[in-house]
Image (spheres, helix red, strand yellow):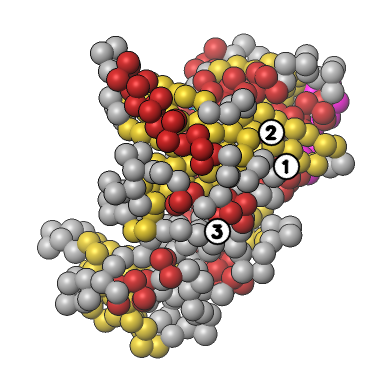
């Protein structure tokens, strides 16, 4: 038994797989092992090892033959060797932190290539690119971070696939301005989550969240709770540096659209800015609206999209899964007032941000709709589209609708190689060529990556 009283096995680690674990075998069973590096010989504490399970899961707790690419983890809370030795579990969110950064990128290369081959039967050579102005250790890039709050008011994070909360203060992947807020010193007891963000302009945002059923009969109770919490928080808020937006939010865990808010500041949204292809842009992004989390992601992704799609003045294009309109803004500049951009987003909050952001650009039409529904209703087609779906990907229904529209160029922005491989295979099967793929190390020290790809309609 390990220090955590978990059963343990000694194995040699095989290749890195999609999801951030190495694949190992023990007595005929597959084990998904986190916190290792392919080729290492390690002892694994089994965190999930049901007799009937098809495969097991575990964490490396001891290294017998170390990879030359192993380094001491930069963060104790996520260090598997040290947390297990202290009878604890590593928190998620920095599961590649024990690997030198260049080797993290080599592993992501291999995972991207293998996933596209295994799921999509596509042969793709991609080189994982570092973002401009990246920290040498890959730290301090997250402009958005969320933390759990325990029953005693302690701020923390969850270990992988666990409900436990391990206390956390400074989060090395978070932007230094988020750590400077010292969120753990706030009176947090009673709340369930705290979210923080810092904009490109250096303005900060804090949202305290409670999970609570919201019905007609609880509305008044919830309001009283928020008012009483606001009284506790008011004196502390003035101490927080550059605080631009502070919000208390109660969300109904069963009905995510039911929320009650109390705003403690004049503003309810951050202003994000970026310079792309020589033009300065700004976007309003609401406290709980979507924005890319790496500080250099907006400019990097939008530039890659422009280079691939090369939209021209007068064209009719669409930005699907548009969020607050990162790609919409640069597309609107490219097509100009004689062109048209359809910007489609399902979230009411983020779509309202987009409506505000493009209120004075007649060439942009913002539509709040599910992409599936929008495509079914659309009577026209487009010269080119951008597709930036959530992790689950666009899916067969959307891909089939796009194929039916016979769109010459599709730029697919993806944060998940597996769903991208499935959708890419469907596009290729339907007659598109995968012309170009770029993969970005947009989430250093985690297993995640982002890709931007261009598909063109084959001329027959
Ligand atoms: C990965 S984000 C991209 C947002 C934007 N392109 C950006 O870079 O800021 C995906 C967006 O799709 C939205 N979304 C998710 N499912 C959707 C659907 N079925 N139809 C429309 N929008 C959806 C989410 O609310 C989110 O804003």
Nearer the N terminus, badge 1 or badge 2? 1
> Disc 3 designates what residue?
173
Q: Is residue 401 above or below residue 216?
A: below
Classify mark 1: helix, strand or loop. Answer: loop
Q: Position of residue 67 (x, y in %)?
A: 47, 83
Separation of residues labelled 1 and 2 (CA atoms): 7 Å
Relative to the observer, which residue lies in front, 292 or 86?
Answer: 86
Please give the name of the residue rendered at 58% of the width and 28% of the height, measured from the top-left corner: 265
- First to last magenta residue range: 306-315
Within 10 Å of disc 2 (Cα), the crowding (few <14, some 14-19, many 20+) is some
Identity of the residue drawn at 63% across and 46% down: 241
Of the two numbered discs 1 and 3 on the same chain, state the one appearing first in sequence.
Answer: 3
Quadrant (top left, top right, bottom left, bottom right) of the N terminus: bottom left
Identify the mark at residue 271; answer none if there is no mark. Answer: 2
State if disc 2 and disc 3 touch (CB < 8 Å): no
Point out the quarter of the image occupied by ligand 1: top right
From this viewpoint, which residue is outermost toward the front?
235
SS of the residue at dot 2? Answer: strand
**Quarter placement of the C terminus:** top right
Residue 206: x percent and y percent? 53, 39
Which quadrant would residue 36 be assigned to in this image? bottom left
Q: Is residue 308 magenta?
A: yes
Question: What is the tally of numbered marks visible in this picture?
Answer: 3
Query: CB under 8 Å between callouts 1 and 3?
Result: no
Q: Tell me the residue that label 1 is attached to.
A: 201
Q: Residues within 10 Å of mark 3 (few under 14, many from 20)?
A: many
């Amino acid at each position: 038994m390990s220090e955590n009283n978990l059963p343990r096995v000694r194995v040699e680690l095989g290749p890195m797989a999609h999801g951030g674990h190495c694949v190992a075998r023990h007595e005929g069973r597959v084990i998904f092992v986190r916190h290792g590096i392919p080729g290492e010989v390690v002892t694994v504490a089994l965190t999930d090892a049901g007799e009937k399970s098809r495969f097991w899961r575990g964490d490396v707790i001891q290294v017998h033959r170390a990879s030359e690419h192993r380094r001491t983890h930069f963060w104790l809370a996520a260090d598997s060797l040290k947390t297990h030795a202290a009878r604890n579990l590593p928190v998620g969110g920095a599961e590649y932190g024990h690997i030198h950064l260049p080797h993290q990128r080599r592993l992501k290369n291999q995972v991207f290539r293998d996933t596209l081959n295994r799921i999509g039967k596509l042969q793709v050579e991609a080189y994982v690119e570092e973002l401009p102005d990246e920290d040498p250790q890959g730290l301090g890039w997250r402009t958005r971070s969320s933390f759990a709050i325990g029953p005693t008011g302690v701020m923390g994070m969850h270990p992988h696939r666990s409900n436990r909360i391990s206390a956390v203060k400074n989060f090395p992947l978070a932007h230094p301005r988020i750590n400077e807020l010292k969120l753990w010193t706030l009176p947090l007891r009673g709340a369930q989550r705290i979210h923080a963000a810092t904009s490109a302009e250096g303005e900060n945002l804090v949202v305290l969240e409670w999970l609570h059923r919201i019905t007609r009969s609880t509305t008044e109770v919830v309001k009283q709770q928020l008012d009483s919490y606001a009284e506790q928080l008011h004196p502390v808020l003035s101490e927080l540096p550059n605080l631009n937006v502070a919000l208390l939010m109660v969300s109904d865990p069963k009905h995510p659209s039911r929320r009650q808010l109390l705003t403690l500041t004049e503003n309810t949204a951050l202003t994000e800015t970026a310079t792309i292809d020589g033009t300065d842009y700004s976007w309003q992004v609401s406290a709980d609206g979507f924005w890319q989390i790496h500080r250099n992601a907006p400019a990097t992704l939008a530039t890659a999209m422009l280079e691939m799609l090369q939209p021209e003045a007068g064209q009719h294009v669409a930005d699907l899964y548009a969020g607050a309109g990162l790609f919409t803004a640069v597309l609107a500049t490219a097509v100009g007032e004689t062109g048209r951009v359809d910007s489609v987003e399902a979230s009411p909050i983020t779509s309202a941000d987009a409506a505000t952001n493009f209120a004075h650009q007649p060439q942009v039409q913002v539509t709040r709709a599910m992409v599936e529904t929008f495509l079914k209703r659309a009577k026209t087609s487009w010269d080119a589209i951008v597709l930036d779906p959530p992790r689950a990907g666009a899916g067969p229904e959307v891909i089939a609708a796009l194929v039916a529209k016979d769109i010459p160029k599709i730029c697919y922005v993806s944060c998940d190689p597996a769903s991208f491989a499935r959708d890419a295979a469907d596009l290729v099967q339907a007659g598109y060529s995968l012309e170009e793929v770029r993969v970005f190390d947009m989430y250093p020290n985690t297993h995640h990556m982002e890709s931007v790809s261009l598909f063109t309609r084959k001329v027959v």
